[in-house]
Image (spheres, helix red, strand yellow):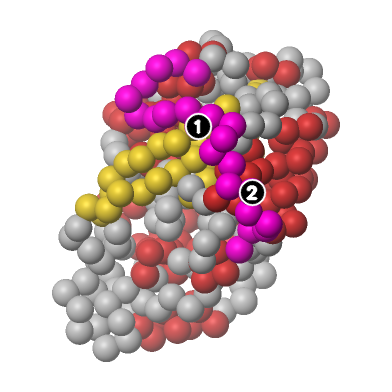
Amino acid sequence: MDKPEPLGDQSLFSHSVISPLRYPGAKRQLVPVIEGLIVANMPPPRLLVEPFCGGATTTLRLLGAGVAEHGILADVDPLVAAFWRTAAFDSSWLISSMQELEISVEAWDRWRAAKPRGRRDRALKCLFLNRTTFSGILHGRAGPIGGRAQESKYKIDCRFGLEGLTRRINGVAELASSGRLLDVWQADWRTALQRVSERYSFLEDDEVVVYLDPPYVDKAQWLYEWSFDSDEHGALASVLLKDVKYRWLLSYDDHGAVRDLYCGRPGQTTLHVSHRYTAAGSEKRTVKDELLVTNLPVIPSSDRYRELDPQSRTNQPQLD
């Protein structure tokens, strides 16, 4: 892998919002913490891989800032994977098609019912629903922004600013054209990890960092079509703690069962992170508690997080 070319406009990647997609629980607030941990442990890793990429804020920011040299996005959702592949490698078509979209409740109903077969149409469905549905939720019971009657002060098109979306999609395309964003895979986390092992075996173990942000433990069934059950959460923990040879970081909502899976296990550190955010449709700032688990050996001191001790386990029988 060659060194990536310089970016034409690096200012985009210093913005607080750089992803074209909105995602529930987006980890924007965690990016500075993740960046600090990676920088404290190694030179820029040659490869950053993000299964469960969703809104991909972490990878976009770290690639744009030069914290990692190259990146790969992966997601099991065919809509999400199609969007990122199209934004990265077919951006002119995506931007042109986006500008011709009708933004209305009637169009929302059509896109919601549509079952596109081609990559381009899947990408457009992902973008449309993500920017016009409450909290950006692609699947489940969420309705259009503003409700079907459109009586709210927030209308269905309030998150569909063409200028901003064009700028962000162009940013993704530049990460790809400069050699930073190497590929996008439609793959679950197991397949993604296996592909890294097979296709990038020439890299040293400590030249690869994997960042994983699995579905919520609570309320996941309302947000994702491919939700994890307790077996999947446990399987992921087992693979990370026993089998993965690369450096990895894992973010979760703070849940007792997640603490039971990781706290006190050898070879990892569990950090508790609290931050404030404004939920969609609310003007109030809410405190959000999250866990960041990693096998990085050096944990610098920071007022952004605190390390949980092994006694933080709750010994719950299973995940909800």
The answer to whether 260 appears left or right of 108 in the picture is right
Residue that sits furthest to the bottom in the current view: 149
The answer to whether 153 appears left or right of 33 in the picture is left
Query: Is the Cβ of the residue at disc 2 closer than 8 Å to that at disc 1?
Result: no
Examine the rendered structure and indicate whether residue 275 appears above or below residue 127.
above
Label 2: few (<14), some (14–19) or many (≥20) C-alpha neighbours in 10 Å = few
Q: Which residue is mark 2?
A: 315
Q: Quadrant of the N terminus?
A: top right
- The verdict on residue 304 being magenta is yes
**Residue at 37%, 70% in the rendered image:** 134
Q: Quadrant of the C terminus?
A: bottom right
Q: Nearer the viewer, mark 2 or mark 1?
A: 2
Of marks 2 and 1, which one's residue comes earlier in the chain? Answer: 1
Q: Quadrant of residue 183?
A: top right
Q: Under tag 1, what secondary structure?
A: loop
- Name the one closer to the observer, 39 or 172: 39
Examine the rendered structure and indicate whether residue 317 appears above or below residue 219.
above
Q: Quadrant of residue 152?
A: bottom left
Q: Which residues are magenta?
A: 299-320
How far apart, in angstroms, are the residues tagged by discs 2 and 1? Answer: 15 Å
Q: Amino acid at mark 2?
A: Asn
The x, y position of residue 185, in whole percent, is 67, 46
Numbered marks: total: 2
**Residue at 48%, 13% in the rendered image:** 40
Residue that sits furthest to the top in the current view: 43
- Name the one closer to the observer, 194 or 94: 194
Q: Which residue is mark 1?
A: 308
- The verdict on residue 258 being magenta is no
